[in-house]
Amino acid sequence: MKQFNLPDLGEGLPDAESVRWLVKEGDVVAVDQPMVEMETAKAVVEVPSPNAGRIAKLHGQAGDVIDVGAVLVTFGEAGEVAEESAPTKAEEKPAAAPTASSHENGASEIFKLPDLGEGLPDAEVVRWLVSEGDTVAVDQPMVEMETAKAVVEVPSPVAGVVTKLYGQAGDVIEVGAPLVEFGGTAGGSAPAKEAPAEKPAETKSADSGTVVGAVEVGNTVVAETSSAVVKALARKLKVDLAQVKGTGDKGQITQKDVKEAAKNGVTSAAKVEAAPISGTDTSSPLAYKASPAVRALARKLGVDLGSCAASGRKGSITRDDVEAASKSTGSRPAPAAPTMSAAQASGLPPVHLEIKPETVRGVRRAMAMGMAHSHATVVPTTLVEDADISAWPKGTDSLARYVRALVTAAKQVPAMNAWFDGQNFERIIHPNVNVGIAVDSGDGLYVPVVHNADRMDMAGVRSVVQELRQKIETKSLKQEDQQNATITLSNFGSIAGRYGTPVVSPPQVAILGTGRFRNELKLTDKGISNAKMLPLSLTFDHRACTGGEAARFLAAVIEDLQLAR
């Protein structure tokens, strides 16, 4: 027997709900034959069969929430021993490494874009490193792909001849879509061995700073109390798990318990279907229930989603609804012209400007997602204060001083140098200080990390920051250069601005913003003096930190900054 596990359905979500099985146990299916309809965020997706064979068992019923990587279908005959397939990513890649026999017979094999490690649904082609007709070796880099904030080299899974490249620089390729086609092995070389099955990635919960599963707290590992499937189902049905009595093993709450609770009205909030507000942007996912493809079609045809009859499942708008609305309303009306423009009044010919929407990609897309993630989960509070830096000698490296002050304050108030798990209400206080540095660029906002800044002097900090900025300019910044920050610095004052409300990036709990220097008159014991003042803005997650901790942290930052050296 062979088991097929639920793959990532293209939205980077941890699970999906079974809507309807299209096959039954005992059926013989062909490759790519649809087997089940699964509902993700706001779309119903058909999951095709990866094999040709007989279905021995279907796992789950309509309404069940299935984790990505969990067993979905078992293929084989009765009495066979089940053969475990690789969970999540190995199953997620629709095209396995080509076999030697297929190449020797001249058959082509297509390598599809794998998940590049960030759980994102797509990546952008930066630069091809090979050309059609090239012979490549196993693990030879073929293309540079830009994910959230890093450029990743994708290696070849086989030794062979490249017969086709899918996409050009700037194209966005979905995970699981064709990337490279191979036409034969080079010199009869054996293909790469299939990678061992990976463990399913830890599932992120609805809380941005949360990891569902085993969570490290101090020097111990604490397991979650309820399964991710149960929690996901509870969120979907708006059930308060605290009010549900578990009937499972050792009092665990099961899916059946959650469904029964939903029927009995044990909910955390009343389910309200809000009507779209007049004037709402109909492209917003919150305005109408429609898939991205349907929204794109509506924009193309000039159809207002508010004029569509929602005939889809659970009140969703379908392509047919949009096309029907387009036929009934006709083409998009031209915008009303003003009675008389300035150009008309002057006798000059009118100027027609065509404004096209710009797709937000790469770094800007990642920034938008991160900001929305923070806004939805963090409880931010900002404290502002000034530091008198008049004692600084000429030529002081301000950025290095900021990092040193953050390190000093983090040692005095460790609660601010932490990660917070809002789902399990746990935090990790870090013994080391990894400072994320917000860097503005033409492509968007990067936040590379100075790892172990507490072990460096100011010259070392400056050297690392310069190296990271160089990587940003040359688009060679790697994922590891941007991971595991424990606190962040935003030096927006190098451009403009006195105070601000910097955005905390979960699971971190604090970010310090430094504003623009200013000179002001200051009353002292010796009279009035001219002082050089540095504005500071500290935003912290009030779920994880008290106001007193934040104030003491800010005071420690100021104390260090006001030293002469």
Image: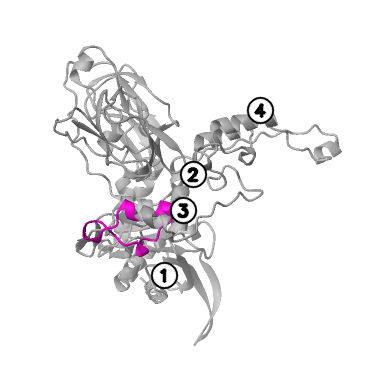
- Amino acid at dot 3: Met
Of labels 1 and 2, earlier in sequence is 1
Residue 371, disc: 3
Of circles 4 and 3, which is in front?
Answer: 4
Residue 81, above or below 226: above
Of labels 4 and 2, earlier in sequence is 4
- Amino acid at dot 1: Trp
For marks 2 and 3, give the CA distance.
Answer: 18 Å
For marks 1 and 3, give the CA distance.
Answer: 35 Å
Residue 184, above or below 476: above
Tag 3, which secondary structure?
A: helix
Of labels 2 and 3, earlier in sequence is 3
For marks 1 and 2, give the CA distance.
Answer: 32 Å
Tell me if mark 1 has few (under 14), some (14-19) or many (20+) residues whose alpha carbon lies within 10 angstroms of its own: some
The residue that appears at 25% across and 65% down in the rendered structure is 431
Residue denoted by label 1? 392
For marks 4 and 3, give the CA distance.
Answer: 39 Å
The residue that appears at 50% across and 60% down in the rendered structure is 493
Front residue (pair 236, 98): 236
Tag 4, which secondary structure?
A: helix
Residue denoted by label 2? 442
Magenta residues span: 235-257
Residue 327, disc: 4
- Amino acid at dot 4: Lys
Q: Is residue 408 left or right of residue 100?
A: right
